[in-house]
Image (cartoon, coloured by chain):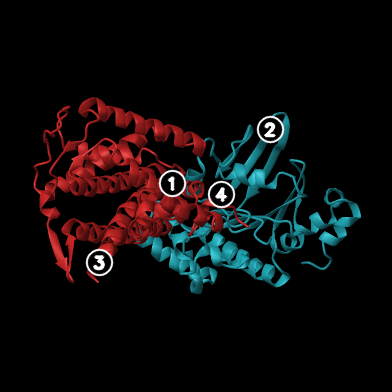
Amino acid sequence: MRRLGADGVTVAFDGLTALSEVNLAVAPGRITGLIGPNGAGKTTLVNVLTGFQAPTGGAVTLDGTALTGLKPHEIRRKGIARTFQGGRLFRDLPVIDNLEVTGVGLGQSRRAAIAEAEAMLDWVGIAALADRIAGTLPYTDERRVAIGRALMGRPGYILLDEPAAGMSAAEAADLAALVRRIALEMGCGVLLIEHNVGLVLELCDHIVVLDSGAVIETGDPAAIRASEKVRHAYMGTAAEAQMPEGVA
Amino acid sequence: MSAILQILFDALSLGSLYALGALGIALIFGVMRLVNFAHGDVIAFSIFALLWPSTDAVAVIFAGNLPWFLLVPFVLVMGAGLSVLAEITVFRRFRKASPATMMIASFALGFVIRYFLLMLFSSRPKSISLLPALSQPVEILGARIPLLQVITIAVTVAILFGLTSFLKRTRFGLEMRAAAENFTMARVLGVRANRVIMGAFALSGALAAAIGLILGSQTGTADIQMGANVMLMAFIATVIGGLGSLPGAVIAGFLLGAASVVMQVTLPIDARPFRDAFVYGAVILVLIFRPQGLLAARGTKERV
């Protein structure tokens, strides 16, 4: 079966366990959510899945093959892309160059990279920003450039690390539409890491809840909303505020 | 009028030297946060590569008698070659070290190159006749300008345009700009880090060699210390320009050249021997008001 998986991933350093035996699978064309309180280990898990951090136990597998020991750019070439918190664009470079250098890094010729970069900006809906210097963009456009950059080379999987942080409700809705298109139109498997639980409940087919480095709950949005454990992790009744009613 | 023209050409040609030097330093700083203090010794080395080892006052020419169209590439290749060799044998091992450690390594490397030259050639400056045709003056609007100055300025402008379009239009240039801004991220995206760094060293070394050619033709001597002054001014230019900013380095190089020449002319006679003190004073003033440099590169400062 085609999937990107964390199989029993453990990360421990100096007696501190950041992740303990975490299992998670992302399937092509589907949006999987990863939520949990601050310090739950969400970003650590993303770092493990993309080769930025080696697990001390367990493995990351792509379609059943372990990706042990691969460097981040090698994993990227296998079609597993990610965005970073805060965008991390090349801020002095024009938007188009940000995408182009990614294509070149993936081994494309410069001409092919330019062509794909232009097509990608168009697809994301920011073709008009192509020649703007990335560092001058507003926050929300910066995120869309980061997503466009991650989609260069048509990866099979994309991991979005808090793409909606700091966005207004309307901006988050635009982002949600884009994430849906990534899964539906590109057939890309999406792992969405978000603090905005409402957004995750709205978008995801399947949700994994992490707390203190361990998976405490998995299931569809309805199951997550009903879960007593999840409520508890989000500090008792205060969770009501973070998990709005009426989100489909 | 012709006096002013003379000053202008003096300022531009001195500024060209500083700008080329600053560019060579900024290129390497950009991709690996290394201030390469061996740069000045690469300048000297590329000229001494034209000579047979000897301790005589008159140079024993090895490749120095080549026609200019072979001599110039030869010197450039020597500079680039030494610079790449320095990266492979020395700086590659310091890739993960702190900038201060790398800087000290570059000092050490500079000493090694200088004493290597000292061993082969002694510390006595040698007279060489490099591209003698360039010492002819030309008349421009009534002013007699040394042809070498005109060529220095023209070559510098050509190099600046060439380098700009290289960085803008080639795949390698694109990778280099990305790596200069955020090396880790570029690497994560699959940019070939070693090639980019080697390319930066090669370019930087060739720029050093170009300075060597100009200095050698200008002074008619090869001296193991010949790069030291340019290196110092070029380093100051990269700081004023904003470390890591290529346009900043070039602009600051020209500004420093202009400041030196203008002060040479306008300072009271008694103060002229202290010209450099005034130039450095101006540098301090600039840094008080713009500590991040004239054009700070984004990659080197914290995000607000």
Q: Which chain is cyan?
A: A
Is disc 3 on the same chain as disc 1? yes
**Residue sitting farthest toward the front:** B270
Q: Nearer the viewer, mark 2 or mark 4?
A: 2
Give the structural element (helix, strand or loop) at label 2: strand
Q: How far across and how far down the image is residue B299, in percent?
A: 51, 53
Give the structural element (helix, strand or loop) at label 3: helix
Q: Alpha-carbon distance for marks 1 and 3?
A: 38 Å
Q: How far across and how far down the image is residue B3, in percent?
A: 25, 66
Is disc 3 on the same chain as disc 2? no
In the rendered image of the structure, the colour used to display chain B is: red
**With B253 as the anchor, is A138 left or right in this view?**
right
**With A158 as the anchor, is B51 left or right in this view?**
left
Give the structural element (helix, strand or loop) at label 1: helix
Residue ID at (74%, 40%): A213
Q: Are marks 1 and 2 in contact (CB under 8 Å)?
A: no
> Viewer-proximal residue, A155 or B70?
B70
Is disc 4 on the same chain as disc 2? yes
Q: How far across and how far down the image is residue B285, in percent?
A: 51, 56
Name the disc covering residue B3, or none: 3
Q: Are marks 1 and 3 in contact (CB under 8 Å)?
A: no
Q: Is A39 above or below relative to A240? A: above
Q: Alpha-carbon distance for marks 2 and 3?
A: 74 Å
Which amino acid type is marked by label 1? Phe
Badge 1 sits on which subunit?
A: B
Q: How far across and how far down the image is residue B130, in percent?
A: 14, 45
Q: Residues within 10 Å of mark 1 (few under 14, many from 20)?
A: many
Name the disc covering residue A2, or none: 4
Which amino acid type is marked by label 4? Arg
Q: Alpha-carbon distance for marks 2 and 4?
A: 28 Å
Which amino acid type is marked by label 2? Ala
Q: Alpha-carbon distance for marks 1 and 2?
A: 36 Å
